[in-house]
Amino acid sequence: MAVTYVRNGLRHMSFKSIRHLNPLGFIILLALAIAVVAMVATQRNEGLAPRAALAEASGRVQSVRVNDEGIDFSLEGSDVAFRYPLNADDRMERVHRALRSAGTRTVTVLYLPAGGSDQQLHRPVNQLAVGDLMVRSYAQVKESWDRRRIAGRWVAGAMLVSALGLAWVGLFGLYPRQR
């Protein structure tokens, strides 16, 4: 609550309630801001393009490498480097095994081609088939992305509600102040 008073002929404004704020409240407000950012981040469907926007490439596996971001691989006859993203789904081992054991069979991928200012080195793969075997279909990958996005929204929502409650307690206390 703002209180106006006059001292030495000048009007001053004092925010008495700010003096009584708990510093923990500001930390909790930071948690609230993080929760809001998490909610906004989960609204996007990053990494999964509409099927119509995907390009197709085929060839034999030239190289396969697993790293922190997913499975990077290249195909003979293609100048594009591919990445099956780590966060795409929970079936990384199946994809890795299929690429390693592909041998002379043709691998077919649907991937998001580079466009505009996109400087990504490896193109994300949204469907993978080895020979006649569909390792991961576009529908399976989309379902996995949707599940993760929904789970992310629930987690972000829980963080938001918790941060609001903790901010209230941190800023104003658990009980009303006695005057």
Image (tube, rainbow, N blue to C red):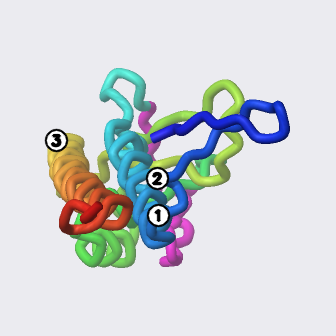
Q: In 3D space, how far apart are the residues under numbered discs 3 and 1 (Cα atoms)?
A: 55 Å
Q: Earlier in the sequence, mark 2 or mark 3?
A: 2
Amino acid tagged 1:
His
User: The residue tagged with tag 3: helix, strand or loop?
Assistant: helix
Could you tell me if residue 53 is visible in this image?
yes
Amino acid tagged 3:
Ala
User: The residue tagged with tag 1: helix, strand or loop?
Assistant: loop
Question: In the visual, does 13 lie left or right of 110?
Answer: right
Residue, disc 1: 20
Question: In the visual, does 107 lie left or right of 157?
Answer: right
Q: Nearer the viewer, residue 132 or 146?
A: 146
Please give the name of the residue rendered at 55% of the width and 71% of the height, measured from the top-left corner.
Answer: 63
Q: Main secondary structure of the magenta part?
A: strand
- Rendered image quadrant of residue 52: top left
Locate residue 126, reporting x and y percent: 34, 46
Q: In 3D space, how far apart are the residues under numbered discs 2 and 3 (Cα atoms)?
A: 55 Å
Residue, disc 2: 17
Q: Quick check: marks 3 and 1 in contact, CB under 8 Å?
A: no
Residue, disc 3: 139
**Does the magenta segment cover residue 152?**
no
From the viewer's perspective, is residue 170 above or below residue 42?
below
Locate residue 29, reporting x and y percent: 43, 57
- Rendered image quadrant of residue 119: top right
Please give the name of the residue rendered at 19% of the width and 66% of the height, measured from the top-left corner.
Answer: 175
Could you tell me if residue 70 is visible in this image?
no
Q: In 3D space, how far apart are the residues under numbered discs 1 and 2 (Cα atoms)?
A: 5 Å
Please give the name of the residue rendered at 40% of the width and 64% of the height, measured from the top-left corner.
Answer: 28
Quadrant of the snapshot with the C terminus = bottom left
Label 3: how many Cα within 10 Å (few below 14, some 14–19, many 20+): few
